[in-house]
Amino acid sequence: MKLKDIQVLNEKETRGGFGEGIHEIGKENENVVVLTADLAGSLKLGPFIKDFPNRFVQVGIAEANMIGIAAGMTIGGKIPYTTTFANFSTGRVYDQIRQSVAYSDKNVKICASHAGLTLGEDGATHQILEDIGLMKMLPGMTVIVPCDFNQTKAATKAIAAHQGPVYLRFGRPKWPNFTKEDGSDFVIGKAQQLSEGTDVTIFACGHMVWKAIEAGRILEDKGISVELINLHTIKPLDEAAIIASLSKTKCAVTVEEHNIIGGMGDAVAQVAARHIPVPIEYIGTNDTFGESGKPNELLTKYGLDTPFIVAAAEKVMARKK
């Protein structure tokens, strides 16, 4: 498939995909329960609360308590989904997640909205850019960063059947929605290949997958053969897909709405270093906090927008030569 052939179905918030997914899986699995820290509206929980009021817990602004309650619920066979902003889902409660969830291998699904620079006007205090690194370092933690509404919905439903702790990261703004509506192109731990190419591989996750598609189209128009891979599951990482792609293209660009220190790019680079050392360029924030602004303006200011991906691809191909 060529990247120009990918069709945008509509623009929807990835958090809306979570809301629909949690409502549907709630109908299918009576053990699914939802907890929130005063953010039911922001996490689109209205339909779930209406249909399953006895399986919903409003904890209030007490995120650490929410994690503890969720861990306890798993002992009785429940599948708790905790919901709040990504900053409060991780940084604020890291000790509770480490001790009560990860160390104890509890079946808690930590669902985190409003992640990254595209949170926009709420600014640096809320735009967490370190959470992927924090969570992927925890033993046994699965880390998933879906790219659009449909994929977020699919991931939300899939993690109910996955045994063990999960961190699911998604965002606030409306964003191009282009993956399959039925979610059949999403499998936990299996990378999604969006195009085949031989000149350069672009690995991306989350909102940045669409930016990578835009960049890939520009590169294709220049006669460059682009292999684009959506690494929606950061852990467990699809190492076989990474190795297979790098064996063809011999260079890569990693694109993420996260600090390049400790993020998806570092995970890809570790695989490359062990198996097939190649030049890699990183697109992401570089050891910095964000600031208040419009989502796309912030992506441009911090070097994450489409032209930067194009430039990084051209640079890494030159390094390969």
Image: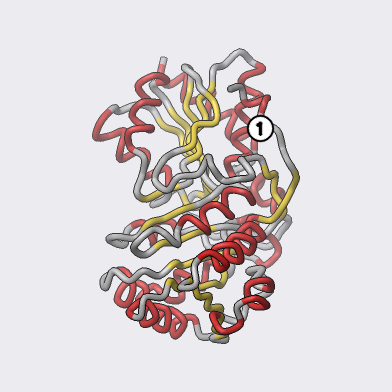
**In-front residue for pair 295/187:** 187
Q: Quadrant of residue 93?
A: bottom left
- Under tag 1, what secondary structure? helix
Asked if residue 280 lies left or right of residue 218, the reply is left
Choose between 257 and 96: the one closer to the eye: 96
Q: Is residue 302 visible in this depiction of the protein?
A: no
Q: Residue at x 36, y 40 (%)?
A: 238
Q: Residues within 10 Å of mark 1 (few under 14, many from 20)?
A: some
Quarter of the figure with the C terminus: top left
Q: In the rendered image of this protein, does residue 302 appear above or below residue 78?
A: above
How far from the left and from the top, in percent, is residue 264?
A: 43, 46
Relative to 279, 212 lies left or right = right
The residue that disc 1 covers is: 214
Percent of width and height locating residue 262: 38, 52
What residue lies at 31% left-to-right and 68% top-to-bottom? 102
- Residue 216: x and y in percent read 60, 27
Q: Is residue 236 left or right of residue 217?
A: left
**Residue 117, picture quadrant:** bottom right
User: For this rendering, which residue is in front, 206 or 277?
Assistant: 206
The amino acid type of the residue labelled 1 equals Glu
Quadrant location of the N terminus?
Answer: top right
Of residues 169 and 223, the one nearer the viewer is 169
Residue depicted at 43% across the width and 71% down the height: 79
Rendered location of residue 307, percent (x, y): 65, 33
Residue reaching furthest to the left: 274
